[in-house]
Amino acid sequence: MTCKTGDTVVLARGLIKRFGDFEAVRGINFEVRGGECFGLLGPNGAGKTSVVRMIYGFSPVTSGRLEVFGEDIGVKARSVKARIGVVSQEDNLDPELSVMENLLVYAGYFRINRDLAGERSREILEFMDLADKAGHVVESLSGGQKRRLTIGRALINRPDLMLLDEPTTGLDPYARHLVWQRLRKLKESGTTMILTTHYLEEASQLCDRLVIMNRGEVLEEGSPEELISRHVGREALELGSGAGLDQYLLEGMGELVKASRVLGEDLVIFTERGRELDRRISERAAELGIEIRRRGIRPANLEDVFLKLTGETLKGGREFTGGGSCD
């Protein structure tokens, strides 16, 4: 049975995961629908990997409800796993085997006969742009090629659901974009994906919907565009104005200001009308004799949403990165 577009593929209600006294996932709710790429966005330690490991039955649910393909993962783990492809954070390829052998050995875990496994492996290597590497040992591959092989290996059982846990961590920008291209093609083919990431661009490029997680909790849910519009508007005006001056500069700005954050000695103001706000702020600063040492307007992004909700960056710290990127 395959997943139809819009069907509920994963359903979590009050999902909790504890490790001893530590609660890694704190009663979260979400739903993943067929054919979409659903993102879990948050810093390291947010609980994203714990959620993924519960979905594919590697880590038992402490409490709450978790259904995959309409089945309780705690009861039907074997049948559910047969329909899932998993790309973990760790490189768990066999380095001494060839690229093709890695795929064939993995196919054996699903009891796929050797002829069919060979056929699927060749298709996967073509799809992942690795056909010319079929006979090379894995140890000789670049980091990006290894990640593409890991993703390809997870396709050997023709999964209805792909779980991708930080699939591009540690890759250079070029290799990361190659992986994104292949993941987009998978999404276009109708494969349902759950993606964990702390890369803003990755979430924006691939995810139809996402939840923003922090410290085991879901802070917000929606499409990237919806979250940005809802919380911070289209633009961010960054000012190096000195700590404690925000209350004076923002006085009288009214609906021009959607939200603002003071980060160290920087003031970041979120708005729908950046140029108008910049002009008004300049006039206000001149009236008050306040020196604005540097300024800049840029498009708002998901990190701005996270900053507004938590006061922290997606790296998990309070240091503002200026451009909002966490690469």
Image (cartoon, rainbow, N blue to C red):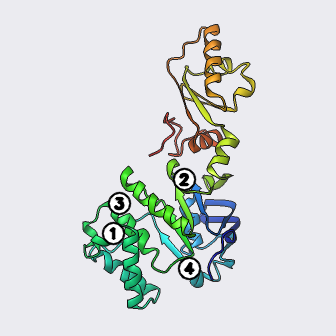
Q: CA distance from mark 1 to mark 3?
A: 11 Å
Q: Which residue is mark 3?
A: 144
Which amino acid, by three-letter code, is at mark 1?
Leu
Q: Which residue is mark 1?
A: 130
Q: Categorize mark 4 by other alpha carbons within 10 Å: few (<14), some (14-19), many (20+).
A: some
The image quadrant of residue 210 is: bottom right
Q: Would residue 229 be visible to someone looking at this image? A: yes
- Nearer the observer, 204 or 327: 204
Percent x, y for residue 76? 63, 83
**Mark 1 or mark 3, earlier in chain:** 1
In the depicted structure, whether residue 119 falls above or below residue 269: below
Q: Please tell me whether mark 2 or mark 1 is closer to you in this view.
A: 1
Residue at 26%, 68% in the rendered image: 139
Residue at 65%, 13% in the rendered image: 284
In the depicted structure, whether residue 96 falls above or below residue 277: below
Q: Categorize mark 1 by other alpha carbons within 10 Å: few (<14), some (14-19), many (20+).
A: some
Q: Please tell me whether mark 1 or mark 3 is closer to you in this view.
A: 1
**Mark 2 or mark 1, earlier in chain:** 1
Q: CA distance from mark 1 to mark 4?
A: 24 Å
**Mark 2 or mark 4, earlier in chain:** 4
196 sits to left or right of 273: left
- Residue 203: assigned label: 2
227 sits to left or right of 176: right
Q: CA distance from mark 3 to mark 2?
A: 19 Å
Which amino acid, by three-letter code, is at mark 2?
Ala
Percent x, y for residue 171? 37, 55
Q: Which residue is mark 4?
A: 83
